[in-house]
Image (spheres, grey):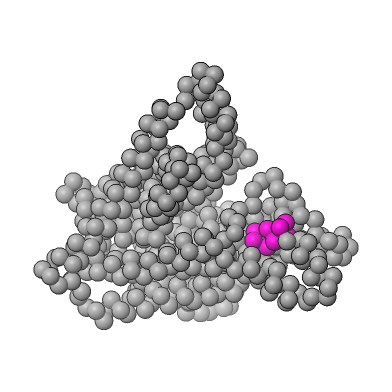
């Protein structure tokens, strides 16, 4: 087993090098810029202005979480109660509740403008409002994004209760316990930690929201820490010091929910994950088949509500003809750049995740304390805003790259840092089930380590790796924050082109481009997942 140990050390150096290069150096440069640029005094300028932006950021994140939980919790509880895990309806609800979170934020922002604008769909129906470019529009968009995600977590946790505690539920029902009592004493203990984890993560994501705030909030009138960082770097005169102050404030705010997320995940008795192939839990007879079918249709209809805003984008796309020679010529270079970014980020994230999983597999049993430190370090990117990291890159590596000339490499690395925790969580279950006896047998029979892995482990790794790569590539195609600091006139990917067209009031072309981004992002994920399922 000497060769696998060498591979393990290579994987360790690769994973730790990523943490040091993409997190340690940028965040260290950011802290040095704030605390050492003015001698021994921090560079806190305009504290009143910073505090005002902090309040606006926390306020929009709090109300986004409040309404997302208020809608997502009862929806997830209802779906998890009425629909069987693993059934066709259950799988359909899982897909429908997960789809909104795969919509690129820049597409969601344009959809919000399409509905809420002065000449938008609601105005055409007679509902005139001043929601666009306001806090209400930002919160509404966040709720449409995050309520289905919370509902999915609650539904999955409820399904697990039906699988693990069905006897307790039946006993409580037989003894005459009301639904409230069953919810409080049997269901709630298994749901609370997944719900708490998802809620805090939604708060964290809302504080780091950029595209939705910029497009729907106007950036001002609604100014958050993310838009403040961007405006100090890209609008009017360059103010790196002011941007660093806002970045530090956002970093401090995000540390609290990030720590809570790790705590809540540690309290979960099971990972919130429904694996393909689980047997559906057969609920007891609660009515006729007709009523059960009606209830299933009701669940699917409720899950479809979050997708309704995007139906307008599809309808307008087919109603008007966007794709012509001029449109194609304008989007050709941004399209090639976006595809290159997606491919580069996908390859880099996948190799990093495989290396991290290998290190975890080699250290989980022999060095559990070191494994905890490793998992903590690898989870750090999920608690840091990509704009904060981008500013840290600007400060740490500015002497080797000129941000105003654009940097393809910086865009790829930032996107890889952003999506690495997601990929790592998707691949980590593979490390917990390594087939060591079969690998040892293959090595004993004379197979090389590579050959042994290919024959024993690769059939199990192939699907999750391709799925992870597809998710990263699809998300990369619509990511705008990771490319907003390092673009140039020669390096403008599709999401930035979309925001530029909206600023130029070219809404017809922007709608066509938004539909194209949506198709590319969703199609990339669906195509690969369909081949590995």
Q: Position of residue 329 (x, y in %)?
A: 39, 44
Examine the residues drawn in magenta and state their main secondary structure: helix
Where does residue 328 sit, x and y in percent of width and height?
A: 43, 44
Q: Is residue 25 visible?
A: yes
Which picture quadrant has residue 231? Answer: bottom left
Image height check: is 388 above or below 458? Answer: below
State the residue lying farthest toward the left.
39
Q: Which residues are magenta?
A: 156-164
Residue at 23% from the left image edge and 63% from the top image edge: 31
The residue at the point 74 percent across, 48 percent down is 279
Q: Is residue 166 magenta?
A: no
Q: Nearer the viewer, residue 443 or 324?
A: 443
**Residue sitting farthest toward the right:** 288
Q: Residue furthest bottom?
A: 48
- Image position of 111 with respect to 479: above or below: below
Left or right: 289 in relation to 213:
right
- On screen, residue 247 versus residue 56, left or right, reads left
Measuring 42% from the left and 65% from the top, which residue is drawn there?
259
**Is residue 311 in sight in this rendering?**
no
- Nearest the eye: 448 or 398: 448
- Which percent across, then down, holds residue 366? 45, 43
For the point 49% across and 44% down, the residue is: 365
């Amino acid at each position: 087993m000497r060769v696998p140990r060498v591979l393990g050390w290579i994987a360790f150096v690769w994973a730790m090098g990523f943490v040091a290069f993409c997190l340690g150096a940028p965040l260290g440069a950011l802290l040095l810029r704030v605390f050492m640029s003015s001698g021994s005094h921090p560079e806190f300028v305009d504290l009143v202005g910073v505090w005002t932006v902090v309040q606006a950021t926390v306020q929009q994140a709090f109300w986004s979480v409040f309404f997302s939980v208020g809608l997502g919790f009862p929806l997830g509880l209802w779906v998890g109660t009425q629909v069987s895990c693993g059934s066709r309806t259950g799988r359909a609800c899982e897909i429908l509740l997960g789809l909104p979170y795969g919509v690129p934020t820049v597409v969601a922002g344009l959809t919000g403008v399409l509905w809420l604008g002065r000449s938008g769909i609601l105005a055409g129906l007679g509902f005139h409002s001043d929601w666009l470019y306001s806090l209400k529009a930002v919160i509404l968009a966040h709720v449409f994004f995050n309520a289905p995600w919370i509902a999915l977590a609650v539904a999955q946790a409820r399904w697990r209760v039906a699988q693990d505690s069905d006897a307790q539920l039946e006993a409580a029902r037989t003894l005459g316990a009301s639904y409230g009592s069953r919810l409080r004493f049997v269901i709630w203990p298994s749901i609370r930690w997944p719900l708490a984890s998802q809620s805090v993560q939604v708060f964290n994501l809302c504080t780091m929201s950029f595209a939705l705030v910029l497009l729907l909030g106007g950036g001002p009138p609604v100014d958050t820490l993310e838009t403040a960082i961007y405006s100090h770097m890209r609008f009017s005169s360059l103010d790196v010091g002011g941007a660093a102050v806002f970045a530090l404030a956002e970093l401090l705010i995000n540390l609290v929910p990030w720590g809570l997320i790790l705590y809540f995940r540690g309290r979960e008795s099971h990972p919130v994950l429904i694996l393909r192939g689980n047997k559906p839990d057969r609920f007891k007879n609660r009515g006729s088949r007709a009523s059960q079918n009606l209830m299933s249709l009701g669940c699917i209809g409720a899950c479809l509500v979050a997708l309704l805003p995007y139906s307008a984008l599809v309808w307008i796309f087919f109603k008007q003809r966007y794709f012509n020679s001029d449109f194609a010529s304008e989007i050709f270079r941004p399209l090639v750049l976006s595809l290159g970014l997606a491919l580069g980020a996908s390859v880099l994230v996948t190799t990093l995740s495989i290396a991290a999983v290998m290190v975890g597999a080699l250290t989980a049993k022999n060095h559990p304390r070191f494994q905890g430190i490793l998992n903590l370090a690898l989870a750090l990117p999920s608690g840091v805003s990509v704009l904060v990291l981008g500013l840290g890159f600007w400060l740490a590596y500015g002497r080797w790259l000129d941000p105003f000339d654009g940097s393809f490499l910086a865009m790829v690395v930032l996107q890889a840092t952003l999506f690495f925790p997601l990929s790592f969580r998707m691949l980590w279950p593979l490390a917990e089930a390594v087939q060591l006896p079969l690998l040892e047998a293959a090595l004993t029979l004379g197979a090389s380590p590579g050959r042994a892995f290919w024959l024993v482990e690769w059939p199990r790794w192939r699907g999750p790796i391709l799925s992870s790569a597809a998710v990263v590539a699809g998300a990369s195609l619509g990511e705008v924050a990771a490319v907003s600091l390092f673009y140039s006139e020669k390096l403008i990917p599709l999401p930035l082109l979309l925001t530029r067209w909206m600023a130029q009031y070219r809404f017809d072309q922007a709608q066509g481009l938004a539909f194209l981004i949506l198709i590319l992002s969703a199609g990339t994920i669906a195509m690969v997942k369909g081949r590995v399922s």
